[in-house]
Amino acid sequence: MGQPKKQSSPRKTGLRRSHLRLELARRVNKTSPVKARTTAKESGKALAK
C-alpha cells in the first residue's frame, strides 16, 4: 500500500491522511474478527510481513 499524501495545510498532526486511515483501522480492529493493519509496531511482525 502506498503512503497517503498530505492534505493542504502543513504541520497539523491529525490532517495527514495516514492518520485518518489509522483511526479507521483501529476502530475496525476493536470490533471485527478480521484485523486491519495499523502500524508495524502495533500490528506486530506477523501482520507486518
Image (spheres, rainbow, N blue to C red):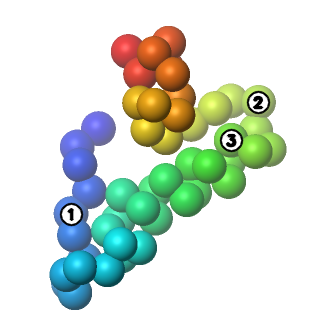
Whichever of labels 2 and 1 marks the residue nearer the N terminus, that label is: 1
The relative height of residue 40 versus residue 11 in the rendered view (above or below) is above
Give the structural element (helix, strand or loop) at label 1: loop
Q: How many marks?
A: 3
Quadrant for residue 30, please give it: top right
Q: Which residue is mark 2?
A: 33
Mark 2 near mark 1, Cβ–Cβ under 8 Å?
Answer: no
Residue drawn at the location 19% of the way across and 81% of the way down: 10
How crowded pointer 3 is (Cα within 10 Å; few <14, some 14-19, many 20+) is rated as: some
Give the spatial CA distance, label 2 vs label 3. Answer: 7 Å
Q: Position of residue 46 (x, y in %)?
A: 50, 12
Q: Which residue is mark 3?
A: 29
Give the spatial CA distance, label 3 vs label 1. Answer: 23 Å
Disc number for residue 36: none
Residue drawn at the location 22% of the way across and 69% of the way down: 6
Q: Which residue is mark 1?
A: 5
Give the structural element (helix, strand or loop) at label 3: helix
Residue extending farthest to the bottom is 9
Residue drawn at the location 35% of the way across and 72% of the way down: 13
Q: Is residue 25 visible?
A: yes
Mark 2 near mark 3, Cβ–Cβ under 8 Å?
Answer: no
Instruction: State which quarter of the image contains the N terminus.
Output: top left
Q: Which one is nearer the viewer's eye here, 12 or 33? A: 12
Residue drawn at the location 42% of the way across and 62% of the way down: 19
Q: Position of residue 48 (x, y in %)?
A: 41, 22
**2 vs 3, front mark:** 3
Q: Amino acid at mark 2?
A: Pro
Q: Amino acid at mark 1?
A: Lys
The relative height of residue 1 versus residue 16 in the rendered view (above or below) is above
How crowded pointer 1 is (Cα within 10 Å; few <14, some 14-19, many 20+) is rated as: few
